[in-house]
Image (tube, helix red, strand yellow):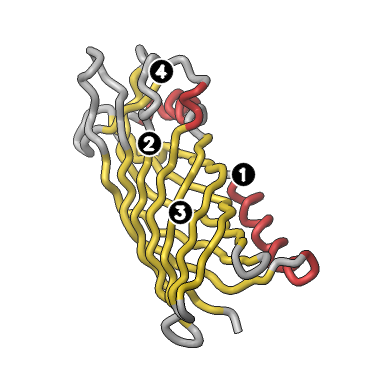
Amino acid sequence: MKSIRYFLLSIILILLAGPLSGFEYHGLDGEVGFLWKHNDGYDTEPGDSGPDRLTFIPGISAYFTFDDHWFFKPALFIYTQTLQYLPQREYTIPVDYSHIDSMSVLGVLLDPAFGYQWTIGEKHHIGVQAGPGLNFQFPLWGPGKDDRNAMLRSLMKEVFYINMGAWYYNPMTERFGFTLKTQVCLPLYNAWTDRELPFSDGLMILGMVGIRVIVQ
């Protein structure tokens, strides 16, 4: 939770320091969509993995520019999932809500992205972005509560991602604009965790639409 507070504090400092540092602040994007998360973890035999999950994900991001092309777009997204901790494997897999050892888990995805945008005509903006991602997962409640601490330790090994995305933006009025975005989150932590799983375990793909509140 401290990391989330530090992230929000950093955004506030950027908002305050932007005019002095060369940043130009343009507005906040409220976004909603779906997150697909791939799972290669298995319970008993390799190849017998749990289901991939599609879940609703809302979020908010701020939009800053350095010039007419380069931008900084830090974002925060939240989502929920149902997981089971496997002590013999020391990792988690997605399960149904009714599972005897299930836990409801809150995901918080931090995405401080840098990128480059093109303007076509006056209203059509296309951007590409990339940056590090931090995906924190917090077990909340459920039948598997006895494994909460062990699950949390396991999930804290699955924090680091590399995120890449593309978006379209159209300023519909002087106050509001429409955004459309897709993003891929690559699980960088698989490069050093020794779980004998494919690198694709934990891969996330987002598809979102949103409204930008334009600063005056």
Secondary structure under badge 4? loop
Q: Residues within 10 Å of mark 2 (few under 14, many from 20)?
A: some
Which quarter of the rendering shows the N terminus?
Answer: top right
Secondary structure under badge 3? strand
Residue at label 2?
203
Position in image of residue 56 (x %, y %): 31, 54
Q: Residues within 10 Å of mark 1 (few under 14, many from 20)?
A: few
Q: Nearer the viewer, residue 143 or 71?
A: 71
Residue displayed at 53% across by 43% down: 133
Q: Residues within 10 Å of mark 3 (few under 14, many from 20)?
A: some
**Which sits earlier in the primary sequence, circle 3 or circle 1?**
1
Residue displayed at 41% across by 40% down: 140
Residues at discs 3 and 4 in contact (Cβ within 8 Å): no
Q: Residue furthest front?
A: 121
Residue at label 1?
3
Q: Nearer the viewer, residue 141 or 104?
A: 104
Amino acid marked by disc 4: Glu
Amino acid marked by disc 2: Leu
Indicate left or right for 86 with 30 as reference. Answer: left
Numbered tag placed on residue 54 in the rendering? none
Q: CA distance from mark 2 to mark 1?
A: 22 Å
Q: Nearer the viewer, residue 102 or 188?
A: 188
Q: CA distance from mark 3 to mark 1?
A: 14 Å
Residue at label 4?
90
**Which sits earlier in the primary sequence, circle 1 or circle 4?**
1
Position in image of residue 93 (x %, y %): 31, 28
Q: CA distance from mark 1 to mark 4?
A: 24 Å
